[in-house]
Amino acid sequence: MSALDFTQTSTTRRVGEDERAQILADPGFGSHFTDFMARARWTLEDGWGGAEVVPFGPIQLSPGSAVLHYGQEIFEGLKAFRHADGSVWTFRPQANAERLQRSARRLALPELPIEDFLASLRAVVAADEPWVPEATSEESLYLRPFMFAGEEFLGVRAAHSVDYYVIASPAGPYFPRGVQPLVVWISDDYSRAGAGGTGAAKCGGNYASSLLGKREAAEQGADEVLFLDSETRSSIDELSGMNVFALTRDGRLLTPALTGSILEGVTRSSILTLAAERGLQVEETHLLISEVLEQLSSGEIVEMFACGTAAVINPIGEFRARGGTWTVGDGGSGETTLSLRQELTDIQYGRIPDRHGWLTRLV
Ligand SMILES: *Cc1c(COP(=O)(O)O)cnc(C)c1O
């Protein structure tokens, strides 16, 4: 049962049909937004309320809002997929709802009940149904729930008034070049998270602290940055917004264990399941960067990839660091990497049976 009722206050569309068709023909990632958004507000006194679906547009925020000063903000990311019969589905939304609750606990924000999270997704996608790309397109409607300290107050404490929104953005490939092997820069100056910090929470602050590393990566001609653990700088954590996997020649699929400084990806968890079902030996472990680079040189590691909702699964073709460059396999897209990607997207688009019950119908 959902306590919040996200009622739609207006049905007037912001974007005309022609313009929408033009956008959907080449949506890119994250630069176009739909007609509507959902919102709700929490106060210490009254709890959650004020749920509604309103036209997408600027929000009013006091310059004294706590989030602008202290960064008390968390978010989620998931996708709505159109199936061949026209229906619209999303992937493991319960996992996102639970993660939003964990992130909220860490950032001293209020937990949104799981049913209310699901109701907010349903409400936005129902209102924005024409924005969900066609089933044949390998595109989706990216959903971005987020929560922040809207309270006008400069004292330092957890906010007593918090805003929750869901906005939506039609999504093509996350990387402009599509599924091409990534060049990844290994940062030795910066970390994204430390022990006891917010690394396991999906919060804007983690991204803010990753941006300089990402810029450094770009200056080195790389697409992404790999962060190592902050204490010893010896083991692999993850990229700025994606988890990392390595496949060995003898069929072991390795990924860093959840140590508290890594974000627990829904894609990561799904890959662990699919890989084990194929007979790969999955290991959540301590991945020493020195050993990984050695095993890339020796050919012991044959494929590596990054994963997350936005990019799904993306092969890594090369690592760069101050000490040199390391090619992964032959530098191309690994066979197992592409096949796992195919299987996962086939499930999401309803092209093969959803044998794990991962899909939830939205419209
Ligand atoms: C969101 C995110 C991921 C990927 O999580 P998914 O649930 O698979 O989308 C990985 N790392 C970080 C830092 C993230 O914020």
Image (tube, helix red, strand yellow):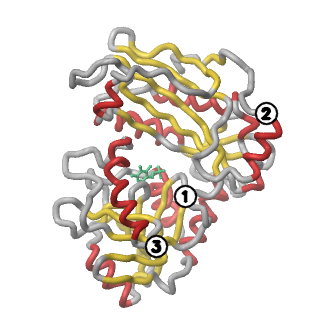
Q: Residue at x 64, y 42 (%)?
A: 32
Tag 3's secondary structure? strand
Spatial separation of the CA atoms under disc 1 and disc 2: 28 Å
Residue 4 position within the rendered picture, expressed as x and y whole percent measured from the top left: 53, 17
Q: Is residue 169 left or right of residue 262?
A: right
Q: Which mark is residue 183?
A: 3
**What amino acid does circle 1 point to?**
Ala
**What amino acid does circle 2 point to?**
Gly
Task: Determine if residue 126 is in view.
Answer: no
Residue 309 position within the rendered picture, expressed as x and y whole percent measured from the top left: 53, 52
Residue 34 position within the rendered picture, expressed as x and y whole percent measured from the top left: 66, 35
In the rendered image, the quadrant that contains the C terminus is: top right
Q: On screen, 13 above or below 186?
A: above
Q: Residue at x 39, y 66 (%)?
A: 217
Q: Quadrant of residue 79?
A: top right
Q: Residues within 10 Å of mark 2 (few under 14, many from 20)?
A: few
Q: Closer to the N terminus: mark 3 or mark 2? A: 2
**What amino acid does circle 3 point to?**
Val
Q: Residue at x 37, y 54 (%)?
A: 211
Residue at image mark 2: 16
Residue furthest bottom in the image: 298
> In the image, which is nearer the foreground, mark 3 or mark 1?
3
Q: Is residue 58 left or right of residue 235?
A: right
Spatial separation of the CA atoms under disc 3 and disc 2: 39 Å
Q: Residue at x 66, y 18 (%)?
A: 8
Residue at image mark 1: 311
